[in-house]
Amino acid sequence: MRTTEVCEIGEVPPLGYVPKYMYAQLIRRERFGQPTAAFQVEKVETPSLKPDEVLVFVMAAGINYNNVWAALGQPLDVIQVHEREGDLSGFHIGGSDASGIVYAVGDEVTNVKVGDHVVVHCGWWDRDDPFIKAGGDPMLAPSARIWGYETNWGSFAQFTKVQGHQCLPKAPHLTWEEAAAPTLVGSTAYRMLRAWPPHVVEPGNVVLVWGGAGGLGSMATQIAREFGGIPVAVVSSDDKFEFCQRLGAKGCINRKKFDHWGMMPHWTDREGYGRWLEGVRAFGKAIWDAVGERKSPRIVFEHPGEDTIPTSIFVCDTGGMVVICAGTTGYNAVVDLRYLWMRQKRFQGSHFANDDQAAAFNQLVVDGKIDPCLSRVFAFDEIGLAHQLMSENKHPEGNMVALVSAPRPGLKGLP
């Protein structure tokens, strides 16, 4: 039901009343570039729903690196992606984490109703995809997309449209901004650590966590802790040790104390390879020192990629797994295959999560077992700034969030 033309930012319309227009942070192709210029607030029509979709009034939205890429237009022109899918709007509304209130539901939605307080996970797929209908994991399906990056109408708007299955209960003890912080990174980490048997974190398993003070790493450390693992966090400075240890890390390693990063020298370069081997062995010893015994990682939680993969493969325990979900330092993974096949290690890719995995992570949040690690809260008009800081690696440890329709921080329900 539409009652007004548009609501001002911070104004909460009566429950279930949907204005014709809304304000959103838009990226357009002609603005591709630095996030502070790429994001601009514009007024657009509030989206209509398909039978399996839900309209969520967004209270807060999480900040993730995928919309740094969207702003840059690299490595993917997201607007071109939308056009291929039949969306000719000419803009991109990003945002792949949200907390908010259900304001409208499609005719076939049964899991939520108007008025429900929800968080949204970013797994989007076609429910009629033959692969899914045959029982396949939706995240392996041809139709799988990341909502708010590969799809339009993400959470950087007063209203967002999502598929019904994406909605999960908001933890009542969390504020809107806290609830918006962890779902993407936490669900991603949960799949990485729990979805690839027999390499699922179990009691006593050492788990090496790259970027332990970041969004992904902070979630991975807590998930490993909850399942009895022994997390060891890799960070960029000693002053991040306390943060990681508070989350459950047994020990921490400052990567700045080592200089062997990057693609490893060719095995025929005996001098260069020897120096690299000396560095990687010293790093392996640092893991043992952090654990307190000569015990190598059963699982290595990877996302830097190019700079760290050679080391990750080497230090992973015999029969263990290196699992990766990103390549923030680059995409070329060079490894010494001898350590991979002779020690029978596994190199596994992982991408977000399916409904079951997202729900399992969310239940940990609802049960109070996961700290969302909220670091900084931005205003709606600062979404470009938040992404700029992330692109320059100047963002604080943990997870950043922007208030969208929540009029102020600290609210757990309606003002």
Image (cartoon, rainbow, N blue to C red):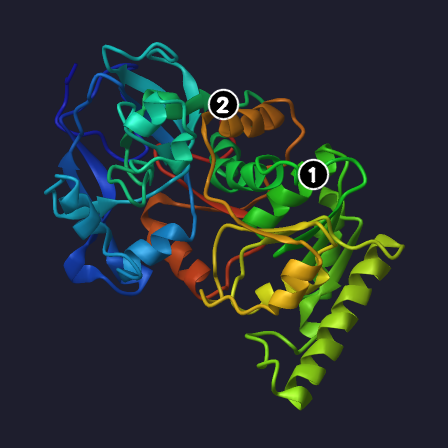
Residue 96: horizontal and vertical position, in percent? 38, 40
Question: What amino acid type should be assigned to the residue bearing mark 1?
Answer: Val
Farthest residue to the right: give it: 293
Q: Check disc 2 and report its element: helix, strand or loop.
A: loop
**Of the pair 43 and 143, the residue shown nearer to us:** 143
Q: Quadrant of residue 361?
A: top right
Residue 374: horizontal and vertical position, in percent? 56, 43
Question: What amino acid type should be assigned to the residue bearing mark 2?
Answer: Lys
**Relative to residue 310, is residue 360 depicted above or below?**
above
**Relative to residue 56, is residue 43 depicted above or below?**
below
Residue 87: horizontal and vertical position, in percent? 14, 40
Q: Which residue is mark 2?
A: 170
Q: Are marks 2 and 1 in contact (CB under 8 Å)?
A: no
Identify the residue at image location x=29%, y=18%.
103
Q: Say which mark, if any, is on residue 201.
A: 1
**How many neighbours does mark 2 have within 10 angstroms: few (below 14), some (14-19), or many (20 or more)?**
many
Residue 152 is at least partly visible in this image = yes
Identify the residue at image location x=31%, y=25%.
163
